[in-house]
Amino acid sequence: MSTETSTNDDPQGGRTITLTQADDGWWVARDEETGVASQGETRQDALDNLDEAVALHKGEIGESIDTREEEEKVLEELGIDPDEVAQARNEHDGLPEFM
């Protein structure tokens, strides 16, 4: 099941957000302009999570990570091995699209 909706955050053109319900019942919301996606158990949860993800993507909220040391600390706090991230960057010529 999929629906599209436009919101008028930008009076010039609005935003296009695609909502899709997965087989497991969760909802996926994707901002077509930025390519950022998020999910939630309900449509509203997915949209709320998408708003936060887009704001992070645009640098409107959150703290920036400016050095390799800061990045390593954050990755370690998240339980992600910084060496694996570095290896993946080398193997795939940069960060994956979602990062």
Image (cartoon, rainbow, N blue to C red):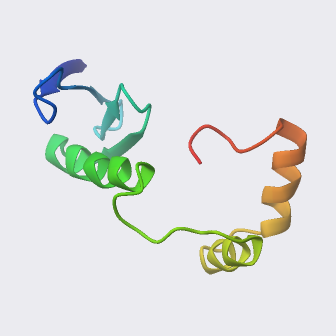
Residue 60 position in % (x across, y down): 34, 58
Snapshot quadrant of residue 15: top left
Q: Residue at x 35, y 47 (%)?
A: 54
x and y percentages locating residue 53 in the rendered image: 37, 51
Q: Compared to 98, does 69 lie above or below?
A: below
Furthest residue in direction front, as rendered? 12
Quarter of the image where one finds residue 36: top left
In front: 27, or 93?
Answer: 93
Question: As displayed, is residue 84 above or below residue 45?
Answer: below
Task: Kindly identify the residue that appears in the image at 37 percent across and 44 percent down.
Answer: 38
Decide if residue 14 is on the left or right side of residue 18: left
Along the viewing direction, whichever of 11 and 79 lies nearer the viewer: 11
The quadrant in which residue 73 appears is bottom right
Residue 13 drawn at (x, y percent): 18, 20
Give the residue displayed 21% in from the left and 51% down from the top.
48
Is residue 14 left or right of 67 when viewed as pictured?
Answer: left
User: For the image shown, how many numbered marks are present on the structure?
Assistant: 0
In-image side of 39 versus 95 (left or right): left
Q: Is residue 15 above or below residue 38?
A: above
Q: Residue at x 59, y 69 (%)?
A: 65
How far from the left and from the top, in percent, is residue 16?
24, 23
The quadrant of the picture occupied by the N terminus is: top left
